[in-house]
Every structure is written in structure tokens, then in C-alpha cells.
Image (tube, helix red, strand yellow):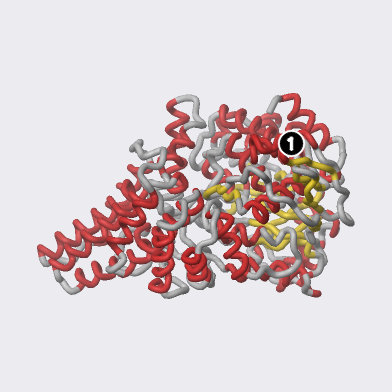
């Protein structure tokens, strides 16, 4: 986008004009050309006034053209999405697009009119910016903004480029680049820098990153606002550079620790005289660079316990944080994550939560019930004591790749909460996953609540979704999705998907630190879904979505099978049965090779692309190497050699399996086999140190992995089904 257009869009917002009350025809027409390309002329966009303040869209036919009406770009994009899915059996998702429009577009025989019951449709978790979005360029961001608009998102979190604003503020305060190098983290760890958990890890951050991502944020915001979205920008939470305590010794600066193996960080006490000044400086600098829609995210105690549980302290702290926003923007609305009320439930009792929330006027705060599908804190807080709040599905932790979630919760709970008299000022719904681009059916199901106020019938929805995703109605596929619905998508009490033992630091146990393997379903009941997908492969012309789903179901079946196979290895070792040990350990390593080969057929499962995208952000070899380390460290160690967070962001990816997980298991099996031959007990403590050395060397290395998919996903899945089905 040209700089003049960016500035014009930003000025429109900062002038106080409500972007959501207008339809930017140029932006919507450009959106149509991006999505349906040469068929864009078959559609007409028209303005339609909001319905009692709520977003609305209509579709109808006018001659041979389809008319899309809406009160803003999001509504028009949602109208297009509705038409494509319900009239053309097409769908656009993260993991595969089916968009084959007929030569003559189907007519809308009766005009359709849809109103959302939700004022706000929120999107993105702080962690998403790192677990999925760390290396995104403008092209990828444009795709996501289009996806947001088509799915009714109007309130995205927008954190890109924040480090450039903080550099400006702190340098004006006299901080040197060397001092800030001990504050800014590497790009894969920004979320935890922003949330006040860590400093500096993965840095020092190059200046080129700060400059280029400031410009990228301007593009992102201009595009979001042009579609009528209301981006949520960050505000000051009190987290300051380590040098602050020495530079300003009279200020009240308190150390706090995240308890994840990192040094203390420093929080400026809200009662400290400079708190308001810094908060005001930051918002002024940010508004000058990025404009504002008056929504600000701030979480002073995210996963950190406050120094006092006294209600008066929390009341005063909350007032100060809000005052620092209002000093720069009297229209400021504080958008607060409710995650801490679940995460630190032993601290956040009703008096503490009430004190924190009641200190801010109701119309200047919105609370994100971040984990509503599993832990709805609104039920424990009298719907946040009168504050507007948003129901969210969190679902994913760490960007893990397992098939998992509760389809019933996604389909039923938002509407149930909306109509519950106890839900107070429920004002919206949203998606807040730590990582995206996985479990596309579950996310589509959840976001399909945007334009309806009644629960979704999952059985009917799955049949419709499969037809849109694969382009045809297929009995085998429909049966397969019913099995998935009642196995991997029954949900469960775990935080995120159960993982395969293959990603664990090698062990004889069935699970390991940071790797949960307990399933909420019988894994043998999932296997028939794999059978059905394999049989459908000969009947269905494979769309992108079908190929992805076939690989994903195959991956899940094989990943599940790894657990009993690993336990056979363990049993053979404990029974001192060398022949059985060699047999089963060889089978386990072969399984890893087969999974790596399978995942190499899909772009979304490539470590090589993740690393390549990271390196592409650097303009010098040193920068490229730094970003590669960030990319590899995040999904493995999550810190240094002795990190207690290792495996938190594990991924079942091509390259990661063969280059990282398999060598660890090979070393483990070599040790155990040697001990069996010698009649000795293996020194597992020494092995742990050995494997840590390997992991750290790998994270700092430069091994090459495939950047593009290789092989035929259907042939690969069929081949592995033939090999493993009887074993299961």
C-alpha cells in the first residue's frame, strides 16, 4: 500500500470519525479482487445502515450480478463469505482453500438479511504473535486480514512494531541503545516482553527489525481500519528496562519473576510519580505513529502475582493504569485479559477482582474472558461486576499441532451465554488461541457464531462444512467427520491438545514434562475415521483442504500409535529382553521417519519454511542467524540449555521430527541397548545432560530443511495406511 494511502487511513481514524459507520468502497472492491480475482465484476458492493448499532449484511441477485450490502467492509466481506459457502460450496480457511466458482454464479432467489448479536468480535492472543505470526510479511498479513473480515472479526489485537515506539520513548528519556539491548527480546519472544514476563532473551534486537516492523504495523492498521475494524493497541503496564532502577533511583521499581527460568524483570509501581508520565508519553508516541481507535490492551500482572492482595492497593493500581491511558486519550477503553483470574486463581478471589475492575468506569473497560470454553470466569465474577465482557475460545497452547477441542462448547456455549440472564453485559465473542493454523474445522465452527444468536447443530454443520471444503458431498467423509466429532473433538479438561510421545524428551514413562499424552477418547475409535478418509481419497478430487485433513488425520493416528509402541520398548527394556527391545525401538524410529515424510507433503507442517521465513527478515548474515535461533529455540527449548519450559511449543513438523526428535530417541535407545548388553542400569541422569547438549547445539546450528512441500500427500497417506493399519 502506498504511504499516502496509509497516512490518509490513519488520519481518518485519528480525526475521530467512526470508521465502522462507513463503507470504504475502494477497500471493499480491492478486497473482492484479491479474493475472487477475475470474478470480482460479478459482485456489487452497496452500503446498508447498521441495525440498531449492530453490524448487518444482505445478499441478493440483481440480474446476473450478486449484490453484497453491509454497513462496513467487514459486513460486506462476511456477505461474500456467506454467499461463497452457502451458494457455491466454497470456503477459505487457514489450512486449505476450495474456491472453484461456477461459470454462472447461483442466483439468490430470496434476499437474505443477517444481523450480528455481538457488538465486538475479538481476535488474537498476545502469544499468537509469536507462536504463529513471528515471521509474517505483509502478504501473509493481508491474507489474514481478509480472513478476519470474511469471518466477521472487527476487533483485532494489534501489537506489531511496538518495540519501535518504546525505543523512541525510552531514548527520549535518556536510555542508551546498550541499555535497551538488555530490555528488548528477540522477535520470537516479544509477547512475553510485552506482558512483562521476560527481558532480552533472543536479542539483541536489530534496528532494522524495529524500523521495518513499524512500517509493517502501519500497513496492517490501515488495512484493518479500511475494512471497518477497530484495532486494539497496547498501553503501558509498568514493565521497564532493567537500567531504569539505576537511572531513576527515587522511583518505586519492584522486581518480579515469571518462574520460568528467566531473570527478574522490573515493574514500575503505579504509585510511582513517573508511571502516569511514561504511560502518557507512550500513547502519544504510538498515536502519532499508528493513530488510535481508543482501545488499549494492558495486563500489569499477567502470570505474575501482585505484591499485595490488599483491595485498596489493587484499586489504586487499576486507577493509575487507566489514568495513564486517559491522560493521553480521554476516550480510552481498557481491554483487559481475564486470563490471570484463571491462571492465578489462588490469588484472584472475588474481593481482589472486584477491586481491580471497579476502579475503572464501566464504559472505559472491556474484559476478555479469555478461556470461556473451558474456564468461564464470568460465572465466578457476577459477569465481571457490570463491565462489558467478551466470550472467547482459547483452545490452543503453544501452537501445538494435535487434533483436539470441544465442538459442542464451540457450537453451543456462546449463544447459551448470550441468553443467560446472569451474563450481564456480554458484548461479544472471539478467538484467543496461542497458536493458529491448526484444527481449522473447530475454529470455523466457533467463528460461525458471529452472525447468529442460537446454538449450532454440529451434525448438520459438519456435513455442510465437508461439502464446502471438499467441493462434493461424500458419504465416507461425512462418516469420518462424525467419528472425529466423537473422538478428538470431545474436548476434555487438559490445557491444549494431548501430544504424541514422539515430541517428548526421551523417557521410559508414558508422558513427560510439558508433554501430555493422555487421550480423552479410545484411540482405536479414531482409526476408522482414517480408514474412511483413505477410502474417500479414491472418490474425491482432492482439494487443498482434503489433502491437509487427510495428512492431519494420518498424523494423529500415527502419533497416537507411538505411545503403545514406546511402551513396548520400555517393557522390553525393563524385562531385559534385548531382541524385543531392538525390534520395537527400530519400529519406533521407523515411525518417526514415516511421519516426517508424510508431514513433508504439506507446507503447514514444514520446519524449513518456519526457519526460512525467520531468516528472510534479516538483512545481514548475523541478523538471519539470530532469527533462525529464535525460530528453532521457541519450538524446542524455549530458553537456554536448562530451560524448564522446553517442549511447551512442541510441533509435529517435518524436519523437526527427523532433525531434532529422532536423534534424541536414537541416542536414548543406543544408551539403553548398550546397558542391556552390559547387564548394567542405564545412567538416565547423565543422558539428560547429554541430550541437553545436543538440543542446545541444534538450536544454535544451521542444518537445512525442506522449505517447500515434497511428494504427494494422498499417496503418502495411503502408503502409511497400508503399512500401519493392521498394527493398530
Question: Can the viewer see residue 252 in this picture?
Answer: no
Look at mark 1 in the image and give the residue it sits on: 29
Residue 651 visible from this viewpoint? yes
Q: Is residue 673 above or below residue 244?
A: below
Q: Residue at x 80, y 58 (%)?
A: 115
- Compared to 506, does 383 lie above or below? below
Q: Nearer the viewer, residue 7 or 512?
A: 7
Residue 650 location (% of width, % of height):
43, 54
Above or below 273: residue 405: below
Place of residue 131 in the rendered image (x, y in percent of width and height, measured from the top left): 53, 48
Q: Quadrant of residue 358?
A: bottom right
Determine the image quadrant of residue 395.
bottom right
Q: Nearer the viewer, residue 471 or 302?
A: 471
Q: Give residue 541's position: percent from left, percent from top.
A: 47, 51
Locate residue 218 relative to residue 607 in the image: left or right: right
- Residue at image location 41% in from the left, 64% down from the top: 530
Q: Is residue 510 left or right of residue 57?
A: left
- Quadrant containing the N terminus is top right
Please state the total of marks drawn on the protein image.
Answer: 1
- Rendered residue at 64%/56% (across/down): 431
Query: Is residue 74 or residue 233 the one in the foreground?
Result: 74
337 or 641, which lies in front?
Answer: 337
Amino acid at each position: 500500500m502506498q504511504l499516502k494511502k496509509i497516512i490518509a487511513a490513519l488520519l481518518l481514524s485519528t480525526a475521530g470519525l467512526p470508521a465502522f459507520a462507513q463503507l470504504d468502497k475502494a477497500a471493499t472492491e480491492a478486497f473482492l479482487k484479491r479474493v475472487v480475482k477475475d470474478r470480482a465484476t460479478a459482485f456489487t458492493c452497496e452500503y446498508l445502515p447498521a441495525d440498531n448499532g449492530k453490524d448487518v449484511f444482505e445478499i441478493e441477485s440483481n440480474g446476473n450480478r450478486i449484490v453484497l450490502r453491509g454497513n462496513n467492509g467487514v459486513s460486506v466481506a462476511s456477505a461474500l463469505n456467506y454467499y461463497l459457502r452457502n451458494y457455491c460450496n466454497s470456503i477459505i480457511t487457514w489450512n486449505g482453500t476450495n474456491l472453484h466458482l461456477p461459470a454462472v454464479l447461483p442466483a439468490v432467489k430470496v434476499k437474505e438479511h443477517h444481523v450480528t448479536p455481538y457488538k465486538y468480535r475479538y481476535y488474537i492472543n498476545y502469544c499468537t504473535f509469536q507462536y504463529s505470526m513471528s515471521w509474517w510479511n505483509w502478504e501473509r498479513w493481508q491474507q489474514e486480514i481478509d480472513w478476519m473480515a470474511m469471518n466477521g472479526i472487527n476487533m483485532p489485537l494489534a501489537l506489531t512494531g511496538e518495540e519501535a515506539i518504546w525505543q523512541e520513548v525510552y531514548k527520549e528519556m535518556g536510555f542508551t541503545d546498550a541499555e535497551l539491548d538488555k530490555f528488548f527480546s528477540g522477535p520470537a519472544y516479544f509477547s512475553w516482553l510485552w506482558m512483562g514476563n521476560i527481558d532480552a532473551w533472543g536479542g539483541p534486537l536489530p534496528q532494522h527489525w524495529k524500523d521495518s516492523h513499524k512500517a509493517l504495523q502501519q500497513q496492517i492498521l490501515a488495512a484493518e481500519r479500511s475494512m471497518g475494524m477497530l484495532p486494539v493497541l497496547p498501553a503501558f503496564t509498568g514493565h521497564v528496562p532493567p537500567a531504569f532502577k539505576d537511572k531513576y533511583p527515587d522511583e518505586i521499581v519492584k522486581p518480579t519473576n515469571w518462574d520460568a527460568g528467566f531473570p527478574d524483570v522490573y515493574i514500575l509501581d503505579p504509585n510511582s510519580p513517573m508511571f502516569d508520565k511514561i504511560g502518557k508519553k507512550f500513547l502519544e508516541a504510538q498515536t502519532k505513529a499508528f493513530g488510535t481507535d481508543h482501545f488499549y490492551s494492558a495486563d500489569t500482572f499477567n502470570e505474575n502475582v501482585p505484591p499485595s492482595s490488599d483491595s485498596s492497593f489493587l484499586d489504586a493500581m487499576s486507577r493509575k493504569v487507566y489514568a495513564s491511558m486517559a491522560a493521553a486519550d480521554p476516550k480510552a477503553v481498557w481491554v483487559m485479559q481475564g486470563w490471570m483470574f484463571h491462571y492465578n486463581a489462588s490469588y484472584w478471589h472475588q474481593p481482589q477482582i472486584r477491586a481491580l475492575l471497579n476502579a475503572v468506569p464501566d464504559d472505559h473497560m472491556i474484559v476478555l474472558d479469555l478461556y470461556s470454553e473451558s474456564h468461564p470466569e464470568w460465572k465466578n465474577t457476577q459477569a465481571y461486576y457490570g463491565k462489558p465482557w467478551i466470550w472467547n475460545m482459547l483452545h490452543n497452547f503453544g501452537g501445538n499441532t494435535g487434533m483436539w477441542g470441544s465442538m459442542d462448547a464451540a457450537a453451543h456455549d456462546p449463544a447459551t451465554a448470550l441468553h443467560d440472564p446472569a451474563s450481564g453485559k456480554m458484548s461479544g465473542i472471539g478467538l484467543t488461541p496461542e497458536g493458529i493454523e491448526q484444527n481449522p474445522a473447530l475454529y470455523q465452527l466457533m467463528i460461525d457464531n458471529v452472525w447468529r444468536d442460537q446454538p449450532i447443530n454440529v451434525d448438520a454443520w459438519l456435513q455442510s462444512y465437508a461439502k464446502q471444503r471438499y467441493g462434493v458431498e461424500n458419504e465416507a467423509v461425512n462418516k469420518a467427520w462424525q467419528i472425529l466429532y466423537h473422538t478428538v473433538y470431545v474436548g476434555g479438561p487438559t490445557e491444549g491438545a494431548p501430544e504424541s510421545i514422539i515430541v517428548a524428551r526421551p523417557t521410559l514413562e508414558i508422558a513427560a514434562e510439558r508433554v501430555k499424552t493422555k487421550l480423552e477418547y479410545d484411540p482405536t475409535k479414531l482409526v476408522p475415521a482414517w480408514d474412511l478418509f483413505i477410502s474417500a481419497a479414491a472418490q474425491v478430487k482432492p482439494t487443498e483442504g482434503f489433502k491437509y485433513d487427510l495428512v492431519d488425520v494420518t498424523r494423529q493416528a500415527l502419533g497416537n500409535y507411538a505411545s503403545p509402541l514406546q511402551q513396548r520398548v520400555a517393557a522390553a527394556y525393563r524385562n531385559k529382553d534385548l531382541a524385543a527391545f531392538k525390534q520395537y525401538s527400530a519400529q519406533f524410529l521407523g515411525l518417526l521417519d514415516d511421519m516426517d515424510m508424510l508431514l513433508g507433503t504439506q507446507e503447514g507442517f514444514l520446519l524449513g519454511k518456519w526457519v526460512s521465513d525467520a531468516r528472510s527478515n534479516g538483512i545481514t548474515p548475523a541478523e538471519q542467524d539470530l532469527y533462525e535461533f529464535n525460530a528453532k529455540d521457541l519450538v524446542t527449548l524455549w530458553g537456554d540449555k536448562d530451560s524448564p519450559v522446553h517442549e511447551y511449543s512442541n510441533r509435529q513438523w517435518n524436519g523437526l521430527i527427523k532433525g531434532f526428535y529422532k536423534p534424541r530417541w536414537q541416542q536414548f535407545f543406543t544408551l539403553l541397548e548398550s546397558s542391556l548388553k552390559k547387564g548394567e542400569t542405564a545412567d538416565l541422569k547423565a543422558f539428560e545432560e547429554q541430550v541437553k547438549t545436543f538440543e542446545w547445539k541444534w538450536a544454535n546450528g544451521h542444518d537445512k530443511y525442506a522449505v517447500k512441500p515434497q511428494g504427494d500427500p494422498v499417496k503418502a497417506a495411503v502408503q502409511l495406511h497400508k503399512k500401519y493399519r493392521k498394527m493398530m
